[in-house]
Image: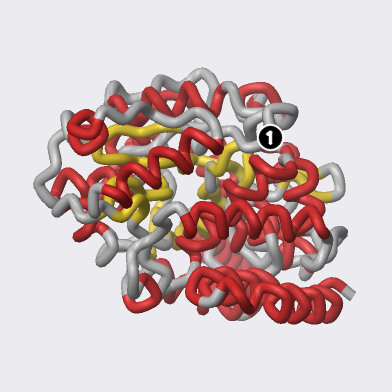
Amino acid sequence: MKPIIKSAVIGAAVAATMSGTAFARDLVITYDDLNPAPKESFEWVIEQFKAENPDINVITNINDREAHKTAIRNFLSADAPDVTSWYAGNRMAPFVDAGLFEDVSDVWTDNGFDETLASTMPSMTIDGKQWGVPYTYYQWGVYYRKDIFDELGLEEPETWEELLEVSRTLSENDITPFTIGTQFLWTAAGVFDYLNLRQNGYEFHNDLTAGRVAYTDERVRATFERWNELMEAGGFIENHATMSWQDALAPFVNGEAAMYVMGNFAVAAMRDAGLSDDQIDFFQFPVINPDIPNAEEAPTDTWHIPANAQNKEDARKFLAFVARPDIQTEWNKRLGQLPVNSQAEVGDDKFLQQGFEVLNAAAGIAQFYDRDAPAEMAKAGMEGFQEFMINPDRLDRILERLDRVQERVYN
């Protein structure tokens, strides 16, 4: 009987070990973009990772971005994948504070990322630790109809007064200076961010989104005064609150509006709509206060290991892999965005080259209002921005309301 029992025990142990090993080698990865270019480029990355790691069984889930934003807290708590995509800055902070993201400082140290990913390290760091790795970012700025500018003899504005003059000239020629679609609010945040960064600077902007400055502060009021000056100079298309950012491309494409404060992801849509690279170009948002160095908007997309992940060892391999310069080079060429790794190569697309130059010279990199501010504050703030664009005479009540939200959210 003893040999039989011994064999049975050994057999059970071997089976358990084999089962455990098989389970441990599964790597579940959740990604948040079903759009064609992001989805196809992510699938390319997965194939490269699998080729280098044939002993890892990679299982992917690809979600709609908005659905991912809604579901992430639930799946991090209940049925976490081993790796999930997300965002840097304050969008990352609630999950760090709740103990739902893994500290991956060792991945940074072991791979020298504190040097090669230095531009985004502050936005990945909380309490002196890193909680994910970045894989892509993209510039914001002003995209414009170069053919319209050329026809009217306009130059790219470098100062606030030049931007106002360009806007007045366009308006006098029955062309709306700026297109925008604020139906989903965040586009107005892009305008606010640039106005505040240029009016008050990077540190002040961070203090505001961190709840250390009141919205009724006179310096914030000055930002809205600049915004009102722009609207009085011809400003933005009518009925923007009924349009998405894609809808707002139509006036830009048909020549009814000449400028768009937007991220570089919009270039593909402009080209798809029939505009050539001879018709569109890009410039930095102009200087308002010459004493303030230019900071830029460059939202950063990231990868994280949930604290409840089952296979953290292979998850760390994946994070190290996606932050490598060779992977970031090819991934971002396919994605049409910029690699974060300083040793990666930038695609030869003219807008990527311009964006890379702008971001390399930036005094700071803002993540975008709805990523830098907590979710409840961001929602209220962006509602206020849209309301101001429609009814600028309501500024006082808007700012007072935002102060009340700020007090509740941060305290």
Q: Position of residue 234 (x, y in %)?
A: 40, 55
Viewer-proximal residue among 21 and 345:
345
Q: Position of residue 48 (x, y in %)?
A: 33, 37
Residue type at mark 1 is: Asn
Q: Which quadrant holds residue 229?
A: bottom right
Answer above or below: position of 345 versus 169: above
Answer above or below: position of 141 versus 185: above
Residue drawn at point x = 33 percent, y = 64 percent: 237
Q: Residues within 10 Å of mark 1 (few under 14, many from 20)?
A: some
Check disc 1 and report the residue beneath it: 289
Q: Quadrant of the C terminus?
A: bottom right
Horizontal placement of 271 versus 359: left or right? left
Q: Position of residue 162 (x, y in %)?
A: 48, 33
Residue drawn at point x = 34 percent, y = 75 percent: 239
Residue drawn at point x = 83 percent, y = 61 percent: 217
Q: Position of residue 58 (x, y in %)?
A: 39, 54
Viewer-proximal residue among 366 and 110:
366
Viewer-proximal residue among 24 and 294:
294
Residue drawn at point x = 22 percent, y = 58 percent: 251
What colour scheme has been applied to the protein in the rendered image?
secondary structure
